[in-house]
């Protein structure tokens, strides 16, 4: 008998009609002779609404209380879905993250899964139950509720598929698979039949929210067979795997990430150890630094510009202001009127001219590039936020992906 993990995102379970639609997908999978473990997200915009409620009370909600609040969203959908499945005449049980054995570290709002104790789920499967697990949540070692970060239910699903050695992990969402660009933004975007873990990891990390980036990382590590497909249209989706068959596609996708802030430091001493002091300070605050640009030193000084996630901007600037006098920084500037647009594809490794074609497309669209960063399989540019959509479309057209 095979075991399938199925995950349904917020829009797939947004109301009673959608819950019954999902219940039918699940029971059909069960009827085909599979054990089924289901992971659900909060209904519709529930998580956003809960966050808004917290900010009505305070603009600095404590991580622990925030997690206790946000975890309730997934509990609503899990229990309702279990009721819907039972109503269709099947055995089902809903479990919270902690009942399902998810143990995490203590980084509230962005916890990492440490372990999943699978006994309870296996017992329920032995009793022939369809098991519904709340996504996105777990317990830390103090028995406090944690959540895995926005979009984290995908990671809950992949973790379960890995631990239970599932035959497949299906991520059901509101589009029919992974596209060459966000299909809501680029009407000519094309659905991919398959994509490699590495390419998908880049796309997810660069703003394509269709999969949580840590879910892809984990799927690669534990060799989980991952598939993204629609809960509304019964058509084949996209398979994420180690190697894709040879094909002519140079670029697999274009992604946009608006969640970027830029910090510029002016007047740094042009001597060894300066960059170390700046970036070790960021690391000590657990702030991830993305693109870094350093100017050529002139008259003993240099400037450094770098990007961080928007939520880290205030803390980064605060920390830098403290060391500014001792480091000789004359000015700190920060803004988030920028966006990052990226192209991803394993094909670019062996094909020169990809960057040139991307920059040409931006030039022709009259879009100025502020910063550039590259790796073997991606190129990212930082541009003005208001030009983001135009840039994605122009680049997508240029590669005819
Ligand atoms: P869910 O609630 O099911 O987790 P998400 O909103 O997190 O769904 O992710 C699905 C959305 O991701 C789609 O509606 C689409 O707008 C967006 N998206 C961004 N980039 C891509 C892409 N390359 N392919 C498919 N969808 C994408
Ligand atoms: N409900 C959470 C969110 O909206 C987790 C998820 O949907 O994956 O981010
Ligand atoms: Mg999601």
Image (cartoon, rainbow, N blue to C red):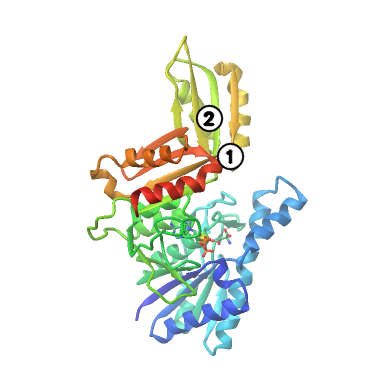
Nearest the viewer among 238 and 29 is: 238
**Residue at (47, 9) in percent of width and height:** 299
Compute the Cα span from label 2 to label 1: 13 Å
Position of residue 389 in the picture relative to residue 331 (left or right) = left
Residue sticking out furthest to the top: 299
For disc 2, the marked residue is 281
**Residue at (52, 43) in percent of width and height:** 387
- The numbered mark at residue 312 is 1
In the rendered view, would you say 15 is above or below 104?
below
Report the quarter where the C terminus lies: bottom left
**Residue at (24, 61) in percent of width and height:** 245
Residue sticking out furthest to the right: 57
Nearest the viewer among 82 and 100 is: 82
- Tell me residue 129's x, y (percent): 49, 82
Q: What kind of element bears circle 1?
A: helix
Position of residue 303 in the picture relative to residue 189 (left or right) = right
Task: Find out if the beta carbon at label 1 lies less than 8 Å from the nearest ligand 2 atom.
Answer: no
Position of residue 58 in the picture relative to residue 122 (left or right) = right
């Amino acid at each position: 008998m095979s075991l399938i993990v199925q995950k349904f995102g917020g829009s797939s379970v947004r109301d009673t009609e959608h819950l019954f639609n999902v219940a039918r997908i699940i029971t059909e999978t069960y009827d085909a002779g599979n054990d089924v473990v289901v992971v659900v997200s909060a209904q519709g915009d529930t998580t956003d609404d809960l966050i808004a409620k917290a900010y009505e009370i305070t603009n600095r909600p404590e991580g622990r209380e925030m997690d206790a609040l946000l975890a309730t969203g997934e509990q609503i959908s899990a229990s309702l879905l279990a009721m819907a499945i039972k109503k269709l005449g099947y055995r089902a049980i809903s479990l919270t993250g902690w009942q399902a054995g998810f143990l995490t570290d203590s980084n509230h709002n962005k916890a990492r899964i440490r372990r999943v104790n699978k006994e309870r789920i296996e017992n329920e499967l032995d009793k022939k139950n369809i098991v519904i697990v709340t996504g996105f949540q777990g317990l830390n070692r103090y028995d406090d509720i944690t959540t895995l970060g926005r979009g984290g239910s995908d990671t809950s699903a992949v973790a379960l598929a890995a631990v239970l050695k599932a035959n497949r992990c299906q991520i059901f969402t509101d589009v029919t698979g992974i596209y060459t660009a966000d299909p809501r933004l680029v009407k000519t975007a094309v659905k991919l039949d398959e994509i490699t873990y590495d390419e998908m990891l880049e796309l997810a990390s660069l703003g394509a929210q269709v999969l949580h980036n840590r879910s892809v990382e984990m799927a690669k590590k534990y060799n989980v067979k991952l598939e993204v497909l629609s809960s509304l249209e019964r058509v084949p989706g996209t398979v994420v795997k180690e190697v894709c068959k040879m094909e002519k596609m140079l670029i697999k996708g274009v992604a946009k990430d608006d969640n970027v802030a830029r910090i510029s430091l002016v007047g740094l001493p042009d001597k060894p150890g300066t960059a170390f002091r700046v970036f070790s300070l960021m690391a000590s605050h657990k702030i991830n630094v993305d693109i870094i640009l350093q100017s050529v030193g002139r008259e003993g000084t240099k400037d450094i510009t770098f990007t961080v996630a928007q939520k880290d901007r205030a803390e980064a600037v605060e920390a830098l202001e403290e060391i500014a006098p001792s480091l000789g920084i004359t000015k700190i500037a920060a803004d988030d009127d920028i966006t990052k647009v990226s192209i991803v594809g394993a094909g670019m490794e062996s094909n020169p001219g990809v960057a040139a074609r991307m920059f040409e497309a931006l030039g022709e669209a009259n879009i100025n590039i502020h910063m550039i960063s590259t790796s073997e399989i991606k190129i990212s540019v930082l541009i003005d936020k208001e030009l983001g959509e135009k840039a994605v479309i122009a680049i997508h057209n240029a590669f005819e992906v």
